[in-house]
Image (cartoon, rainbow, N blue to C red):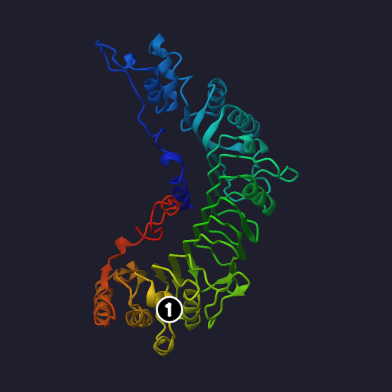
Amino acid sequence: MGELVEKFMGWFPGGRNAVAGAAPISAAVDYEGEDRISALPDDLLRCIVSRLPVKDAARTAAIASRWRHLWRSSPLSLRDAGLLPSAVGRILAEHPGPFRVIDIARCSFASHERELAEWLRLLASKGVEDLVLLNDAADLELTSDTVRLPRDILRCASLQRLFLAFFWFPDTDGLSHGAYVLPNLQELGMFSTGISDWDLDYVLACCPVLEKLVFVLNSMPDPIRLRSESLRCVILWFFTVEEVAVVDAPLLERLFFMEAPRLGDDSILMIKIASAPNLRALGYLETSFHRLQIRDNVIKPGTMPSRSTVLPGVKKLAFRVNFGVLKEVKLLVAFLRCFPNIDTLHIESLTQPTGKSHDKFWQEVSTVECIKSHVKKMVIHEYRGEQTELEFLKFISRSAHELQTLDVLLNRESLTSVAKATEMKNKLVALSRVPWTCECKIMVLGPEYQNDWSIQKASDLTVEDPFYW
């Protein structure tokens, strides 16, 4: 849980610690020199003050009469580390705004619901741009007693980024869909926060510039239905639902499913993509329990490509596969045929020793268009050197005509002893002897090169390959 929280916190505005992590200021002892800082223009002094920890920013008013008005006329950046709720309330009340970043993560709102309501009214009236609200609750599990956010948070018209943790989302039942709420909201992230299907529909319908949506360990509606004219990136991480449906998302570029726990051995997650014409990156698709429906077509082993079963815009694609299970291998091929134009393919191997061989299957597989004509880069994560993994790479070696680079990232557990390292070395010798139909540069990399996956990088639309950097 702690690692997940830290990864989520890393996505907060400005790295989250940019303001509050600064060391407190202190006066130089017995300094009698010229005060040159006070001679700077007001705009520059306000910029300096707005970047100080809030306690020090307020104290600048005591430096000299020249400084008295600066803190109140500078955009406020507040993090509540080391502050009592009473101090937070006083600062929000006394500062006229605007508020650049408000980061409140040290308050248990179960005993401060009145303060929460008042603070949100102040934030809405004074203009907050980035807001972090983390309910510092003793019980981190969502229950009927978990604090529900007041509707006033939806009145923060200046909000651009909103990050919530350990709350229930405001109840939007009965609110009008006509007027936009949060008209400037671009990013919404929620960690262990509950939201109903109608509340999610309301937010997506009423936030006209919302581009990034991240849900981690949330209590989610089932199914999750995505309808948005503005969304460009959606990340679902540690979520338990049976269906995710992209109903209509014309600008959606990235759709990520990260580590969704199974509800049972027979459970599946149905991923339906009806309309996402701009989708460019998709993953991780897990062949063990993900099922894919494109428009009205459920993709099954043996499904051949047609205009109604392909997503030609996708360029970056990622899978998790156990190559030792023939059912998963067959589904992998069927899935690959749905994405004829991918140029980068990532596969994380979940393969365990089985003693089985699927070489006959790979020998008989007919042409897979993306492998033959488009994939230029392939990355195999967590390679264990099992026979079934090698059989897949042999298939790639004779089928991929355009492949330029193949990165093979070794599984850490396969190198934990001298005996295992020696065994892996022998397996890599076998890999090096595979003949290739194209001039492909192969790099075998140690476990230290495995991805440290982060929300911040995955949601950065300037990063070309969101699965590997």
Q: Which residue is mark 1?
A: 323
Q: Nearer the viewer, residue 5 or 200?
A: 200
- Quadrant holding the C terminus: bottom left
Tag 1's secondary structure? loop
Residue 142 vertical position relative to residue 300 in the rendered view, above or below: above
Does residue 143 appear in this view?
A: no
- Residue drawn at the location 44% of the way across and 70% of the way down: 341
Q: Position of residue 463 (x, y in %)?
A: 39, 54
Does residue 434 appear in this view?
A: yes
In the rendered structure, the answer to whether residue 28 lies left or right of residue 94 reads left
Q: Position of residue 163 (x, y in %)?
A: 53, 43
Residue 359 vertical position relative to residue 80 in the rendered view, above or below: below
In the rendered structure, the answer to whether residue 24 lies left or right of residue 248 reads left
Q: Nearer the viewer, residue 124 or 91?
A: 124
Q: Position of residue 387 (x, y in %)?
A: 35, 83
Count of numbered tags: 1
Q: Amino acid at mark 1?
A: Phe
User: Where, by quadrant of the figure, is residue 56 drawn?
Assistant: top left
